Amino acid sequence: MRRYLYRRAGASFITLVLASMVVFAGVRALPGNMAVALSGENGSAAAIAAITREYGLNKPLVVQYFDWVRQILTGNLGISPQTGQSVVQEVAQRLPVTLELTLLSILFGVVVGIPVGIFAALKRGKPIDYASNSLAIFGLSIPSFWFGILLILFLSVRSHILPSSGFVSFFSNPLGNLKDMIMPVVVLGSGVAAILMRQMRSGMLETLRSDYVRTARAKGLPERAVIGKHALRNSLTAVVTIIGLQFGVLLSGVAVTEQVFLLPGIGQLTIDSVFQRDYPTLQALALLIAASYIVINFLVDIAYSLLNPRVRLTGASK
Amino acid sequence: MEKLLEIEDLCINFGSQPDAVRAVRNLNLSVDAGEVVALVGESGCGKSMSALAVMKLTPPAAIATGSIRFNGTEILSAPDSVIRKIRGREISMVFQEPMTSLNPAFTVGDQIAETLRLHLKISKQEAAKRAVELLSRVRIASPEKRARAYPHQLSGGMRQRVMIAIALSCNPKFLILDEPTTALDVTTQAQVLEIVRELEGEGDTGVLLITHDLGVVADLADRVVVMYAGSPVETSDVGGIFSQPMHPYTNGLLGAVPRRSDGIRRRLNDIPGTVPVIKSNPGRCAFADRCSYAADDCAAKEPELFDIQGGHRVACFHPVGVEEGAIL
């Protein structure tokens, strides 16, 4: 198991290095130029030249890349030209909002999707199965911005149950914070719930047909143990993978929902940075998202090996 | 005196009348304590379905009627709570597929201990200890180490022995072996059969042995029921089946067994055709199309089991070796 972890950690590090190169190249390949964007519509040649010099944009790209790597290693990602704040500070302010939104959405998806998926599998072909399937298709196909607007319309504008937008920190006002989060979490989480429900249902149906579930019944185990222990554990592997993937998808895909509910997360920051050609912030955000993908994948692999002994032991074999 | 297991007029159908497909029709069978009864027939003849019915494990779409009495309990109508106390405790089953019958997510020791803890209400440590003992009883070398292994780390033969260990764990009164050696190689087969034979020698466990391997039947069984397309076609003690097979199908099965004296050049005898899918009331002998003894009456009526001599019963209008007109 330990060897398996080392190997996976090494592979993750290499992936991260490659990702940093892709991020850097990707940001530089954006049409336009930071210096031009920053100096405004009618920026003078001198102003452009000054910004170019300040951010080292005249150096060869390879040198710029290594400058950036040095910055990452020292933990100082430079100053954002759009706000004048340090990039680290800027991202650190925004990240908790997005992280909270993402985690709560995943939680919503898990709490709703997994039990409904199991239930649908057990009641296969019954009305409850069809109902939950239809609901899942609805959850998957409804565009998040539209769903968000509908929620705002009914829950805020018409009935004033929830605030339509805005954000207070959990630490200054926990209840207010959760109230702000309900609608965005439902919008993002319903998609996750739908995907997890579908996956859980099909995984469960497959394991319920397996010979070892029949063996479990033949042992005299009550149905609760047959489902909850023997079938669930084996149908969870695919679900865990999807939870991990969804985490990444949400982290990089919250921009629209953050816009709709005016949440000051990294999604909003990303959009602003793209328009401003704010290279330092953009690079930091892209690298952050790539790094979280990698970390999540690593965690998924660990969870996977805990659920499935075959993965763990083949990884550890000589 | 009531037998340990008594199956009377067991019918298992899939789907509803009149389009029902019949898996088993009018199976009558009894097994006494300490007795081995073999259920013989080719794939799809209803053997496994009958065995699953004894455990009340038939798939939800299967409709079973008739009666299965085990030790005074009517299985088919018993509530789940009663059945769960019988499964694994009083009746155990070893399945045909050792590769897939164990749960890949748990160690084999855990899977044996689970049954022990469920039925005997013993501590975790005690169950783990007994699991190791059971592994050595089914002749698994270094049982302490193997108990911590996952199924995928074991060979098919070892997995089947683990399945047998699970089946034996609570000293059941009745054991169902569903083709226990079919998926195994010849050497492993012999070892597994040795374990079963040993078990027979030491106790009064009743065994229902399902197989299509006539060698295994000759080796272990006291009595034999031959099934064809869901119906029993011949039942007898084991000697009668081998010395005087009366149903043309049994006769054909025995003819298909290779003999050493045949030499390598002879083609094996076979029974032409395949097992038909039988609707619930065919009104004719299901074997007639493949039978070289078939006559007009075989297509007019479905034969019932007749007692021909001393408990040797055959469902055929033209039994092999019995003179025409000897039965009506």
Image (cartoon, rainbow, N blue to C red):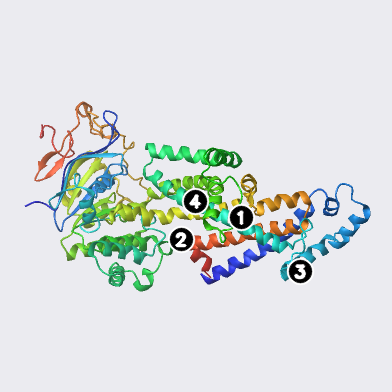
Read off the chain for label 1.
A
In-front residue for pair A126/B172: A126
* Residue type, mark 1 in image: Thr
* Residue at numbered disc 3: A70
As helix, strand or loop, the secondary structure at mark 1 comes to helix
Question: Where residue A183 sits: x, y (%)?
Answer: 54, 46
Q: Chain letter of disc 3?
A: A
> In the rendering, which numbered label is found on residue A108?
4
- Residue B235 spot, x, y in % from top left: 17, 45
Q: Are marks 2 and 4 in contact (CB under 8 Å)?
A: no
Sequence-first tag of 2 and 3? 3
Relative to residue A64, is residue B265 drawn left or right?
Answer: left
| Labels 4 and 1 share a subunit | yes
In the image, B55 versus A27, the foreground residue is A27
Q: Amino acid at mark 4?
A: Phe
Q: Which residue is mark 1?
A: A98
Task: Look at the image and tell me whether residue A164 can be seen.
Answer: yes
Residue B183 can be seen in this image: no
CA gap, disc 2 and disc 4: 22 Å
Are the two marked residues, 1 and 3, in contact with CB atoms closer than 8 angstroms? no
| Mark 1 closeness class: few <14, some 14–19, many ≥20 residues within 10 Å | many
Quarter that holds the C terminus of chain B: top left
- How far apart in space, not on screen, are marks 2 and 3 (Cα)? 39 Å
- Measured in 3D between alpha carbons, the distance from the residue under mark 4 to the one under mark 1, in whole angstroms, is 15 Å
Closer to viewer: mark 2 or mark 3 = 3
Q: Residue at x 50, y 54 (%)?
A: A107
Identify which amino acid the numbered label 3 is placed on. Answer: Arg
Disc 4, SS: helix
Label 2, on which residue? A307
Q: Quadrant of residue A297?
A: bottom right
Residue B326 at what x, y percent from top left?
10, 34
- CB atoms at circles 2 and 3 under 8 Å apart? no
